[in-house]
Image (spheres, rainbow, N blue to C red):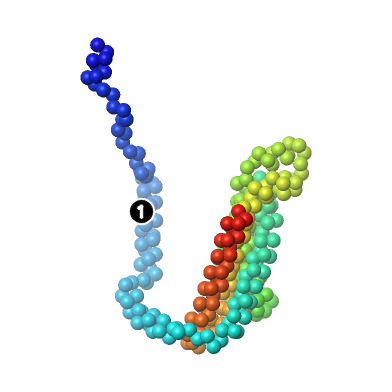
Amino acid sequence: MSMNNAAASPEPATRRLAPPPRFERPGALTFALYVAAAAFVIVAIQSSGLSVDRLLNGLPSISRILGQMFPPDLSRAAPIGLSLFETSQMALAGTVLGIAFSLPLAILASRGISPHPAVYYTVRSLISFFRTVPDLIWALFFVIAVGLGPAAGTLAIMIDTIGFCGRFFAEAMEETETGPREALTAIGGSRTGMIFSAIIPQAMPSFINTSLFSLEKATRSSVVLGLVGAGGIGIELKVAMDLFNYDTACTIILFVFLLVLVVEQASGWLRAKII
């Protein structure tokens, strides 16, 4: 009898279940915030003055400038190359100095590692301030302080790197596993020993990754810093654009592109080898 009932109403091997919703249905307040954010984005785009008509009217000017850029003028390739070398030195020196200062500041700005909450919040605020002020403003400040030249650019990159690396170094140390540090503390290890034996070794891959990215960032930034007299190839680009020497400007842009490309490729190779 039971066998007949089982045959009459066979149980399906797999039950058809309704798929879960892709997105969770937002509440009334969340939906209102979404609508407000979308409206703000639309108003921002409209207030920017962008329009298809203005873009179409500007196409002839763009094509004229591009026509004057090509072929590039290579007559000043040697001095441009020297300025580019100065730019790369400025970026490397500023990045190395910034990383060196970032590590102790990041230790003081790491939750659970900093010696006191007052120190934690003070150093966190300092790192945020370094990161908030644009590197171009730092370059102007140091040009006034130490004069024109690569020294101002190096200091500006150093401060910008501290703001960038200090934050990510601190977060990397906060995300390390607590087991090793607790074990060292339990056997009477000092705070310094805990930091350099349990925390920094775990965070080292993240340190290397962040440092290489900061070098790429500094290489691109160093070009712009030269526009305000902070050394490097930026001043060459500014002079070429001011004198409407677009073919020379094209040469400078191509040189900068090659420098950034080399730095990015070398950075990617190092990340693959080290991490």
Residue at which label 1 appears:
35
Q: Residues within 10 Å of mark 1 (few under 14, many from 20)?
A: few
Q: Is residue 222 above or below residue 210?
A: below
Quadrant where the N terminus sits is top left
Q: Position of residue 259 (x, y in %)?
A: 56, 72
Q: Which quarter of the figure has residue 42?
A: bottom left
Using the image as rendered, state which of residue 153 and residue 16 is in the foreground: 16
Q: Which quarter of the figure has residue 19?
A: top left
Residue furthest to the left: 8
Q: Position of residue 214 (x, y in %)?
A: 59, 63
Residue 52 visible, this angle: yes
Helix, strand or loop under label 1:
helix
Q: Is residue 135 left or right of residue 40?
A: right
> Measuring 65% from the left and 47% from the top, which residue is drawn there?
202
> Measuring 58% from the left and 61% from the top, which residue is drawn there?
269
Q: Amino acid at mark 1?
A: Val
Q: Is residue 210 above or below residue 136?
A: above
Using the image as rendered, state which of residue 32 and residue 219 is in the foreground: 219
Using the image as rendered, state which of residue 38 and residue 172 is in the foreground: 172
Q: Is residue 75 left or right of residue 113?
A: left
Q: Is residue 44 above or below residue 199?
A: below
Q: Position of residue 175 (x, y in %)?
A: 60, 46
> Measuring 39% from the left and 69% from the top, which residue is drawn there?
48
Residue 111 visible, this angle: no
